Amino acid sequence: MSLRLEPRLQPSRLMLFASPLAAVVATLIVGGVVFTLLGYDGFGAVRQIFLAPLTNINRWQDLLVKAAPLAIIAIGLSIGFRANVWNIGAEGQYVVGGLAGTGIALATLDLSGAWILPAMVLGGIVGGMAYAAVPAFLRVKLGVNEILSSLMLNYVAIQLLYYLMRGPWRDPMGFGFPQTAMFSLDQTLPIIVPRTLIHLGIPLALALALAVWFVMARTVAGFQVRLMGLSPQAARYGGFSENRIVWLCLLAGGGLAGLAGILEAAGPFGQMVPSFPTGYGFTAIIVAFLGRLHPVGIVLASLVLALTYVGGESAQTAIGLPSAAIGVFQAMLLFFLLASDILIRYRLARGGRDAGGAKAGAGASRSGEAAV
């Protein structure tokens, strides 16, 4: 006797929305057990990562600052994911967007004016879109899988960053450190709450979530994207161009990733440095699925994943937890989320040759009885 997965006739909508919470709880429990077995204070680590930042009002601003880029990138990725266009290159698009905006900042370093920051933001969006256009072109024209092409382009972007930081863009007054000059006041995001780190990018992330929700739920373009994900054949029958939707999804995801990149460069960093890639592009994939590809859910999910960054820093100093533990908790969260999705859409059933033979024999016996 063996077990097999068979589709459910109607997946539970309640479980579909409750499973992210169940995945978080499972991550806390299993994570605590795993790190305890590794010799750390496992449940102390869980407390430091997921609870301590919530009880310290001074860390709330850190959560918002970390959650904003995660939400912006994940919102862009969710557009493509709903159409089964799998952009895994958001990290590279985030880096290139930051570099494009930084290039404008360095070119206008000696200038002043309110137009500089918007120009940097526009440069970041265009840079991210241009980088996402590469896998879009490869898929549409050559049939190259966008998962592989966008993933490999991440490493190209990081190497480009290292080259610029150690070469043409290195600050000659930076005491030999591989970094650009600090941005001027006109090139940095304004702080909207005095004496905090809360900058303009945080309300912008909320506005983008509402805008994308409206586009996806109330416009023809959003309907095309959703229909392509649900039934490509129906979308083609309706006259919708698959290639156009691929371009739309990848450019939207790249543009928002580039926007997040320049907002980070002009916000918390205040310059471009080699440590700019922080894994936000990969973590945003988890955020998108944890938020059920819905912009409002993504905003909430970004706060959960921001906890792993903010709380992870506290856990490193408080209990000596290694920095790699953040990635472990994020990976477990994705694993439990995907596992719960499987069980929501499928159920375990007994199958195999023995079971099939028994059923056939029982059927034959009933047929013989009916004939008699």
Image (cartoon, helix red, strand yellow):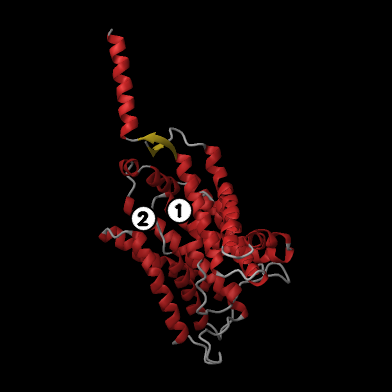
Q: In the rendered image, is residue 293 in sight?
A: no
Which secondary structure, mark 2? Answer: helix
According to the image, label 2 marks what residue? 246
Give percent across and percent down for residue 242.
33, 50
According to the image, label 1 marks what residue? 79
Quadrant position of residue 130: bottom left
Quadrant position of residue 118: bottom right
Give percent across and percent down for residue 321.
60, 68
Q: Amino acid at mark 2?
A: Val
Give percent across and percent down for residue 284.
51, 60
Which secondary structure, mark 1? Answer: helix
Q: Could you tell whether 73 is left or right of 199 in the image?
A: left
Q: Amino acid at mark 1?
A: Ile
> Image height check: is 366 above or below 188?
above
Residue found 34% across the figure and 46% down from its top: 240
Residue found 33% across the figure and 26% down from its top: 358
- Residue nearer the viewer, 246 or 268: 268
Q: Could you tell whether 368 is left or right of 21 in the image?
A: left
Task: Verify CB contact (< 8 Å) between mark 1 and mark 2.
Answer: no
Looking at the image, tell me whether mark 1 or mark 2 is earlier in sequence order.
Answer: 1
Residue found 41% across the figure and 48% down from its top: 225
